[in-house]
Image (tube, rainbow, N blue to C red):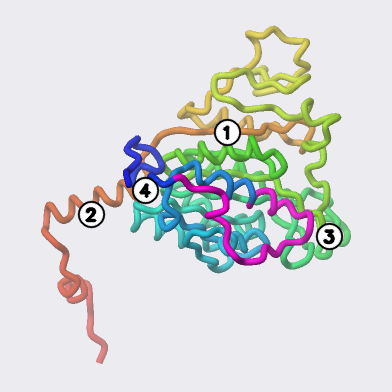
Amino acid sequence: MSDILNGRGLSLVPKTDVKQSMKEFKTDQEVRWCPGCGDYAILAAVQSFVPDLGLRRENMVFVSGIGCSSRFPYYMNTYGFHSIHGRAPAIATGLAASRPDLSVWVITGDGDALSIGGNHLIHALRRNVNLNILLFNNRIYGLTKGQYSPTSEVGKITKSTPMGSLDKPFNPISLAIGAEASFVARTIDSDRKHLQSVLREAAEHKGTSLVEIYQNCNIFNDDAFEQLKNPEVRDDITLRLEHGRPIVSASKAVRQGPRGLEVVDRASVREEEILVHDTHNPDPSLAFALSRLDEPAFQHVPIGVFRNVDRPSYDERMAEQLDQAVADRGQGDLHDLLHGGDTWRIN
């Protein structure tokens, strides 16, 4: 056994020298999602990807909240925790902060993460805890049978909005960048190669990574992302985000206009006018502007890593504080703390 000593997201997680396979990360539990659900594709992609990390299964933990995606830990032959609604980031924060030898993954959905769990999500992102958050976005509440979610579009007809939703939806990428997340990406359930490449970058990142995964719910919101899967149009509307490369689709390009970023016909601009993507830009404003390019939705959709910057992780800084406290004052004494000056006795 050896350690990854590259100073990145998996730096303290023990590795194994034994070659592992996808089969070893599958459990004996029956996978129970609706036939055709996009969750199957994501599960298969993760199960076939994690052996490449070279981590021991007992050093990986998948934490979920409540929702269809939250069954995920049952199907991964690692440690897992099926927690309560919206609180997975809080539980995962405790794990990551106290156990730097663990690779911690949060599995959540658009309802679980952005409704009741919204505060837990944004605070995990701003703290930069060393964990990976996979946000399955199907733009609907699937487990509770088809109510509108925080990412459903305006006018969406559902069981809870029979006359159409009035709420402007969250853009998860914009929200994450607004919370100063250090790693933010978007991918899609049906593109395994792209999904796994993004997951690999997320796993190597030191700090919080958030990966939004467009995931089809074929029962309550079928074909929500059909444009990105339709071979007749997907290459034209999908703007590939790759560090150091021009941001283009088959027919469109992104350039800096007088009022911000704009998408234009690729043939109408010179190569030097096309914006070159920089995931490591410490200023989040350009990444935020890129996240707004799918408004209105699906005329042109950026896919890939929006932001990947280095900054100290919460658990790293907490460990430094604890070491400093011990060096300055010696080992802490719980009795002295509980009976210090800021206590009182009730008769």
Q: Where is mark 4, residue-wise?
A: 13
Residue 87 % position (x, y): 52, 63
In-image side of 154 versus 204 (left or right): right
Nearer to us: label 3 or label 1: 1
**Going from the N terminus, do you reach mark 4 or mark 1 first?**
4
In-image side of 166 versus 330 (left or right): right
- Indicate the amino acid at tag 1: Val
Badge 3 crowding class, 10 Å Cα cut-off, few under 14, some 14 to 19, many 20 or more, is many
Nearer to us: label 4 or label 3: 4
- CA distance for labels 3 and 2: 50 Å
Q: Where is mark 1, residue-wise?
A: 305
Q: Where is mark 2, residue-wise?
A: 322
Q: Which residues are magenta?
A: 19-43
Nearer to us: label 4 or label 1: 4
Residue 30 % position (x, y): 66, 66
Secondary structure at numbered mark 4: loop
- Name the residue furthest bottom: 347
Secondary structure at numbered mark 3: loop
Badge 1 crowding class, 10 Å Cα cut-off, few under 14, some 14 to 19, many 20 or more, is many
Q: Residue at x 57, y 22 (%)?
A: 277
> In the depicted view, which residue is nearer to us: 254 or 44?
44
Q: Is residue 5 above or below residue 326?
A: above
- CA distance for labels 2 and 4: 20 Å
Secondary structure at numbered mark 2: helix
**Which disc, if any, is residue 158?**
3
Nearer to us: label 2 or label 4: 4
- Indicate the amino acid at tag 2: Leu
Residue 120 % position (x, y): 51, 57
**Going from the N terminus, do you reach mark 2 or mark 1 first?**
1
